[in-house]
Amino acid sequence: MENSRLARIIFNYVRRKGGVSFVEFENIFRENGFDYKGHKMILYPDAPNIVVWLGWNQAAVDIIMEVIGMGAGFTCTSPVIYYCDGGALNLPIARTTRGYKKELHWLPVVMNVEE
C-alpha cells in the first residue's frame, strides 16, 4: 500500500475518533499489511530525552509526519489510555517536558484533528 494512502486512512480515523494512541496506529498498520517495526525513536520537540514512541522504521515515522502535515496534532494524555489500548513503553513516565537530562522518559500522547 502506498504510504500516502495509509496516511489518509490514519488521518480520517483520527478525525472520526479523536484521541488516537500510537498503539492504535500500530493496529492500523497491521490491518493494512504495513511493516512498521524498526529502531527509530520519536522524541518530543525541543525536549531532550522525552520519548513519545519508539520501535518504528523511518517509513512509519514519515507516515505520521504526513498525517501531522494534514492538520493533526498531539496532546498529552494519561498512560491509562495506553494500558487500555494494550501497550505502553517500558520507560519512566514524564510528568512535564522539562528536566529529564540524564535518562529517557515517556510522555504519553494522543493524536487529534483540530477542525
Image: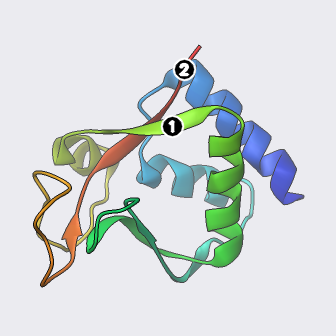
Classify residue 7 as left or right of residue 46.
Answer: right
Nearest the viewer among 97 and 108 is 97
Distance from the alpha carbon under mark 2 to that under mark 1 = 8 Å
Q: Residues within 10 Å of mark 1 (few under 14, many from 20)?
A: some
The image shows residue 86 at horizontal and vertical percentages of: 31, 53
Residue 20 in which image quadrant = top left
Q: Residues within 10 Å of mark 2 (few under 14, many from 20)?
A: few
Name the element at disc 2.
loop
* Quadrant in the picture for the N terminus: bottom right
Extreme residue in the right direction: 2
Residue 76 in which image quadrant = top left
At 18% from the left and 41% from the top, the residue drawn is 78
The image shows residue 108 at horizontal and vertical percentages of: 27, 51
At 67% from the left and 35% from the top, the residue drawn is 11
At 18% from the left and 73% from the top, the residue drawn is 91
Q: Vertical placement of 27 versus 69: above or below?
A: below
**Who comes first in sequence, dot 2 or dot 1?**
1
Nearest the viewer among 63 and 13 is 63
Q: How is the image coloured?
A: rainbow
At 39% from the left and 65% from the top, the residue drawn is 53
Q: Vertical placement of 48 versus 84: above or below?
A: below
Q: Is residue 10 visible?
A: yes
- Residue 73's disc is 1
What residue did someone put label 2 on? 114
Q: Are marks 2 and 1 in contact (CB under 8 Å)?
A: yes
* Quadrant in the picture for the C terminus: top right
Q: Amino acid at mark 2?
A: Glu
The image shows residue 48 at horizontal and vertical percentages of: 28, 72
Q: Vertical placement of 65 versus 74: above or below?
A: below
Residue 13 in which image quadrant = top right
